[in-house]
Amino acid sequence: MTKKEISLSYKVLTVTSLLVGIILNIRKTNSIISLLSYYTLQSNIICLIAFLSYIFMELRKKRYKSDVYYLIKGAIVITIVITALVYRVALAPNGFQMDSLEKSINNKIVADFMVHTLSPLLVLFDYILFDEKGRFKKYYPVIWLILPLNYVIYVYTYSFLGGQFYGIGGSRKYAYFFLDYEVLGLTGVMKWIIVISIFIMIISYVLVFFDYLMGKKKRPR
């Protein structure tokens, strides 16, 4: 197989993981809207749409890896890597769950693993294995922060319109405990948003620095 064929096959695998993870999470839920309002599902859906477009363009043999591609690719990598890291560091230890599905082999355990671990790793390694390095620009992390911050606006808008979450280990009105200003107060929520934003920027600049180093290695001397 050529590298392009391997890349295409890998992207099909990634799409399969993303799609199966999303379906397993929503197939028995009591409220699809509530579940799709979690950052985890939204980040997986964004990656699914992006990877479907990559597959389409590769099948059409189109050249699509422009500066805009790398700006967007970095954004979705950071978006779903943050999904995995925040879940493991801040949410799972507090017993957070997106739904009340029973922990059976065909839903909760597998579903959580796919959207919080397997799919994020597949998306990250697609960049590591198949993308040209040295294409990320120094200001990209500032733009990449827009997606996570937009989610905060979405949560409060959704809650204001009467939307609710499952609230298991989190908040019934605001999805995650760190967004619940009724418990933490506005100052408490702002502190959490600032801390998470700094965390995202650090991870983003680590990725940009890694990209720079790998790109520098491949440049002719």
Image (tube, grey):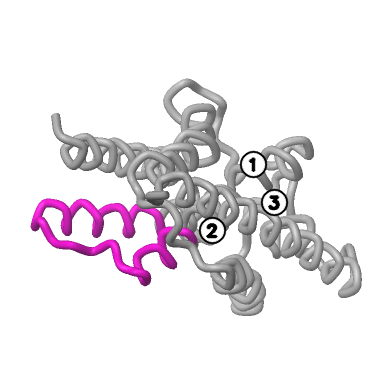
Q: Is residue 60 above or below residue 30?
A: below
Instruction: In the rendered structure, find residue 219 and report the number of the disc placed on it.
Output: none
Q: Is residue 85 above or below residue 107?
A: below
Residue 69: give x, y in percent of width and height.
35, 65
Question: What residue is pinned by disc 2?
Answer: 34
Residue drawn at the location 83% of the way across and 71% of the way down? 190
Residue drawn at the location 57% of the way across and 52% of the way down? 207
> What range is drawn magenta here?
46-74
Left or right: residue 9 versus residue 154 is left
Dividing the picture into quadrants, the one containing residue 182 is bottom right
Which three-letter amino acid code belongs to the residue tagged 1? Gln
Residue 218: give x, y in percent of width and height.
40, 46
Left or right: residue 11 versus residue 2 is right
Q: Nearer the viewer, residue 206 or 82?
A: 206
Residue 82: give x, y in percent of width and height.
61, 51
Please report whichever mark, 2 or 1, sits nearer to the chain's N-terminal start: 2
Label 3 SS = loop
Residue drawn at the location 45% of the way across and 57% of the way down? 134
Question: What residue is pinned by disc 3?
Answer: 167
Please report whichever mark, 2 or 3, sits nearer to the chain's N-terminal start: 2
Question: What residue is pinned by disc 1?
Answer: 97
Residue drawn at the location 10% of the way across and 56% of the way down? 61
The verdict on residue 59 being magenta is: yes
The verdict on residue 49 being magenta is: yes
Left or right: residue 63 versus residue 40 is left
Q: Evaluate if marks 2 and 1 touch, with contact meaning CB atoms under 8 Å apart.
A: no
Which three-letter amino acid code belongs to the residue tagged 3? Gly
Residue pushed farthest left?
A: 60
Label 1 SS = loop
